[in-house]
Each structure stands twice: as C-alpha cells, then as structure tokens.
Amino acid sequence: MSAVTDNDPLWRKVHSSTGVLPRSRHGHRAVAIRELIIVFGGGNEGIAKDVHVYNTVSRQWFLPAVRGDIPPGCASHGFVCDGTRILVFGGMLEYGKYSNSLYELQASRWLWKKLKPRPPRNALPPCPRIGHSFTLVGNKCYLFGGLSNDSEDPNGNIPRYMDDFYELELQSMSGARGWTLPETRGSGPSARESHTSVAVAGPGSPKLYIFGGMQGHRLNDLWQLDLDSMVWSVPKMKGIPPQPRSIHSANVIGNKMYVFGGWIPAPRTHKPSSSEQWICTNSLWVLNLNTMTWQSLGPDEQSEEEVQSQLQLSQGPQGDGPYLGRPRARAGHCTAAVGSRLYVWSGRDGYRKSWNYQVCCRDIWYLETDRPTVPEAVLLVKSTDCMLHVAWRPLLAAERYLLQIQPVAPPPSPDPPVAAPDDAHDGSRSNAAGVQSSLPAGEDEKSSKRTALDVSSGTQGEAANERRARGGAQGEAANERRARGGTHGEATRAPLRTHWLPSFRAPGQQRNTSQTSAQEDGSKAQSKSEKEPTTTADAPMELDSGGNQVPGKPDDMAWFDCGMFKTLFSEVTCYYLPPENDQMIVSGRPSNAKEPSSVHKKLPGLVDYEGRGKQQLVPGQAYRFRVAGMNCFGQGDFSPTSEFKVCQPGFPGAPSAVKITKANDSVHIAWEPPPSPSGRIVEYSMYLAVRKSRSSSSDGQMAFIRIYRGTKTSCTVTNTHLDNAHVDYSAPNRPAVVFRIAAKNEQGYGPATQIRWIQDSKKLRSRADSHTEGDPDAADSSS
C-alpha cells in the first residue's frame, strides 16, 4: 500500500454484514453506543418504525425486542444519545403530518418511554416539525429550526421555515425536566431545515456549529454559538468552503468536522430536466475546528464518465484488497462516528434524480481517519503446561492486531515439597494472584446477538491462582506449593474460563433476568505475603537469585512477535525469533539488539513469518504480553503489558461455564468441571469477597471467605452471605460481587475461576445505606 496522504479519503465498504438487514431508506437517523450503531426511522415506501442495531465489530445486524411506549415510525426527526439512553424528537409521521413528541429509549433494556417535559415559561413548547437539528451538550439538548406545516387542512402542506431555538434540560438518569427559550445575543442563523448541527467541547467553553440547510435554496454558511456566553457569531474561515447543500451529514471526530453527501446545485456541465436543478454528491469535506480551515477530500461535481466509473467502484474493495472507491452520491443517509471511523448507511441514491423514483442505497461504508488507539492490556483466557490462550478487546479502528511476547527471567530450581496443613478454616481470608481476562475465543464474529452495552461486551471470568495457605487461608497449602514447584515468592498466573451472557438480545433469544454476566475482575489483584511482593502489569517483576521477585527492567529486554491476527485471541504455544540482520524493538523503540521487524509505520499486509525460527513456551515460565492495532494509517501504540505464567503439569484447571441464577432469597451458582482435570476431581471450593472491617489493613486486596466445599458442581449462596459481600468498583460503571471457584484433584487445588456478578449501580447507590443487595444484572434490570 502506498503512503497515505492528507488528501486520500480512506473509504472501505463492508461486504460481509449478516443478520436482520434493514430495508433501504432515507431520512433515518443513527447514533453510536461504543461499537454499536442504533438506527431508527426513515422512509422508503412507508415510514419505518423498527429499531435496528449494527455491531461494527462482528458486522451483524439485529432487531432488539423493544417494549414500553413504542413511538410511531418517523423520518427527518431529532435523534441524540446520552450514555445508553437515546432521545427522539419530532419528525414526519406521514405526508404533511409532523410530530413534536419526545421519546426516550433506554438501550440497556430496550425500553421506550414517552416524556412530557414542562413547556417554557411564557411561551409555547416547540411546534411539530421535520428537518430540525437536535444536539446534545452535557445534560442539555438544543433544538434549532426545521420545517413546519401551517396548513389547517390535514391533507394540505404549507411549509414554513423556522429559526426558533430551544433548550431541553435532561434529568440525570432518565427523563427530561423542561423546555426553555434561552436568551442569545448576536444575529443568529436564518430560518432553515435539513441543516446539520454539531457540538464541540474543547478546552474553552463548549460550542455549537450549524452548517448549511435549505431555505428555498441551499445554504453553505457556518454559524457558531458559544454556549457559555450564548453569543452567535460567524467564524472567520480559511480555505474554499463546500458548495451549498442540504440533507447532508456532519460528524465530529477529534478536532475535525466531516461533512458528507447531500443535495447540491447541479453543475453547469450537467443538463438536468427543468425540474432537476439539484443533484446528490458523494463529496467529503473536512473542517479543522482548531484553525477553522476547510479542506476538500473529493470533488462535488462529476462527469458522466466519472459517474459510470463511480457506479462500478461503489462495489468497493473485494476481500482483503486495498481501499478502493467511495460511497455513491446520496442524500438523507445516516452517519455515526465509532471511534475514529465514520460509518455511512443507506440514503437516497444520488444517481436517480426523480423524486418519484424512490431508489435508496443499502450499503455500509466507513471512513478511516486515524491510526488505532491504545488497546487495553492483553487478557488471559486459559493457561496450560504448554500454552497461554490470550485475548484482547477490539479496537474500533483496527484491521488486525500485532501480538508480542517477552519472556520473564526463568524461575529458579524448585524447593523440595514442604508439609503443610491440609485444611483451612471457613471464613478465613484468601488472597489470589489475579490476572485479567478477555473475550471468548472465536466469539468476535458472533457477538452482535449478545453484545452488552458495557462494550467491553462479552467480558469473561478472571481466574486467579490459589496459593499456599497463609495464616489459615484456603486449604491445601502444601499441594499449592508443589503446584508451583515450592518456589518462594513466585507469583503465578493461572487459567481462566469465559462466561458471557447477553444484555443486548437478538431475535429468538430468551430473556432471563435471573441469569447474569459472569465477567472479569478488572482489578490487578495480586498475591501478597512477606515473601511474595505485589506485582502489576505496569511494573513487571523478575526473580532474584533467592527466588524473590524484584523489579525487572523490561526496557532492556527483547519483544518477540507471536503473529498478526484478525481475530481477538491467540493460543500461544511459541513465538517467532528474529531473522538475521534485523533490528529489535525494545518497548516500542528500536535498539541494536535483535527482534522481528514486523512493526511498520504503514501496514502493507500480513507479515510473512515463514522460515522464522520458533521458540516454544516453557512450563512454569512467566511471559509478558502486549498488543497493538493496525490499519491503513499504520500501527497504533502498544497496550500496557500483562504478565501470565504457563502452568505446571499435574494440577487441575479452573472450573468453567459458570451460571448464576437469582432467586428471591438466595443465589444459585453452577459450573462445569475443568476441561483439563489432570486426574479425578475430589472436591470444589467456592469463595466470596466480603467487606473488610475497619481494623483490617487497606492493602488493596479483597478479603475472601469460603462459603462452599464439596463434590457437587453447584451451590446456593444465601442472603446472609450476600449482605456482607464486598462490591468491587474496579471496572468503571460495572460494580460487581466477586466469587472464586477452584477444583482439587489428587495433587491439590488448581487455579480458581474468578467471576464478577454485575450489579445495578443506580440501585446500589440508592440502597447503600441499608446494605441491601444490588440488582443481578444492570443491563436487564427493570425500573
């Protein structure tokens, strides 16, 4: 691939989307909730009323089962997103019949609710309209302009362009307080409809920008409203502005506003019929909001030859080919910014110029605007004695991922086994060497039907190794030491099992409010004792000559490629050694040492590892991992490092497939035996993280008590235990109660599966004083 220049619009068409594909349309709207695009409304042979969701990671469409005050279908409406709630205002219900209703969709539960905000003081609420702008800034929505119908005849249509400006104050979690007519200064925009409005919250006061639209003729003026001073102004622009246009789209990514498509004046070279004075465009314009400079990334006008060529190129790149072509000209399409990508879906086909011939596109394109961002740390799915199954969460602008590995200093010779008590007292404190977890292997192409609004969607259980007993902590201390080779001070990482239950549900899925996601513990909990200092992924540790951990120097150590992947996981059994005369990358910076040269500023394609030497993973060895996303702009920065250890043979793996069912006065937890039991499983132990007493030390570790020990693969947790449970807030917006389950064979206890039972943060706050239990699943909880 040639180098990317600033003038190259990097469009790519999505070819392999699956699921319940919505019919083509125009006048619809879209918003993004992390990797999900939610589409509502629009018209083409009737106005659509269904909510469609597109998962940009799995490339799947699905129809959520909505409930509540379901609104009628509408087109050219206002549509904004505040966290996981979506607000809909106004729009066309049918020809000449417009709406001024306000609806809220709680996307975490797919619950519609009709809102009735109070009207402004000494004024009427907004009248029914279409083609208005509706823009969210903080806890307020700003409504400007639009087109109303002044005809008293229900079958008539007397259009009126409007320039009124309303402010809608929202409540914190749900609902709206009321409309106001804010007092503005300066001469504002003229009356118009089918314009665009975007908000920018920079280091100074937030700004609202209104561009283009229709007022009997198309417009291309840009207006700025300072939302602190409420002063309208026309910014001083640089560069050649876009042609006048309407029914276009505008989105802010970073410090730039991207304007795509719409209706523009027909060029002089074009010879339309007397009724065709406007044509669609597929031009892309960028406004740098720091310098207020316009830049064109594609011409507005096209010759007939270019039109025919565009129709052919609109099929886009085939397979994994280069970025070719661009979307067809269109108007009334929807766009949504997902990370650094701009997605475009459907819209009226710009090459069919008669309004009586409603032909719409049905394609999905995205525009790449930047390199991938920094990923989260690599997560562990499973560890065996010869393999580390690792995974990572998706980056919204990555085409593939580069995974690298770094061996930690090898462990010393094991100490001889030491006898220790074979039991522990229930209720004692248990610490475990925590590790992070990830998406289930192979689920990246199946996730749209079960993606939670917590778009760490499909996160899974985090396992931690059960260690030798310390002061009456959990049992089988001697066996734990034998499992680690009896090494003093050796922090060991352990297998994980994944548990992923849906919050977003596709058609056919059964809603079970008693089932909850068993998700990973996002905290970096580590084992701690006098001889086992705490370690973190950001501060890798090595072993000294006495077997104790000391801070390592990763900047002086080599990183090796595990490969480049389109998937979100890899079962790592080996890594590639560098070829001769190659330069090593040390923590992302070149040095004189040897390392693979697979990291490029520009990504021409997959690196050919054929012929490279391989190094197999060693049992009991610890390794650090990091990952970086790659796209046509090149490689992004590496993630923070994570450290995992290959297991010693002979001990059981971690229990898997944990399911939690909520009853009225208890919780039932079931699991499956370890996939690799390494012999006969003789018993299981279940632990619960509990609140610490004020007298206990605040060392950042969770305190655990054993609440079950037996041979069955299930247990019941009573409310007596749950009332004393610790709520872990390490994962933002995902408070959870933490459980650990470990299996024991003839050798001893293996690593534990750690699961986070997600709670409803709103109900936890409201019940904090009474210490009552949170809702089992925030995404599925009822209001």
Image (spheres, grey):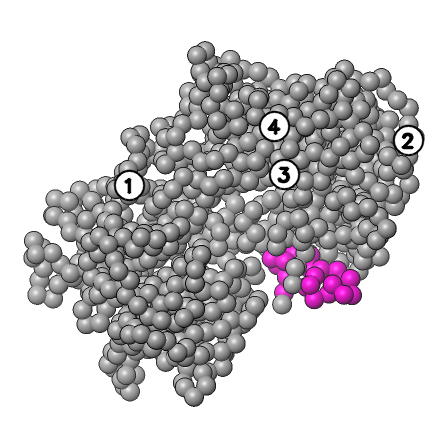
CA gap, disc 2 and disc 3 = 30 Å
Range covered by the magenta-colored residues: 763-782
Q: Quadrant of residue 603?
A: top left
CA gap, disc 2 and disc 4 = 33 Å
Q: Residue at point 86% right, 33% down? A: 469
User: Is residue 781 covered in magenta?
Assistant: yes
Kindly report the secondary structure that dominates the magenta region of the rendered protein: loop
Front-most of 27 and 341? Answer: 341
Q: Tell me the residue that label 1 is attached to.
A: 6
Label 1, secondary structure: give it. Answer: loop
**Sequence order check: which comes first, mark 3 or mark 4?**
3
Label 2, secondary structure: give it. Answer: loop
Image height of 79 relative to 629, above or below? below
**Sequence order check: which comes first, mark 2 or mark 4?**
2
Q: Are marks 2 and 4 in contact (CB under 8 Å)?
A: no
Q: Tell me the residue that label 3 is attached to.
A: 437
Estimate how packed mark 3 is, as few (under 14), some (14 to 19) or many (20 or more) residues with alpha carbons within 10 Å: many
Name the image quarter holding the N terminus: top left
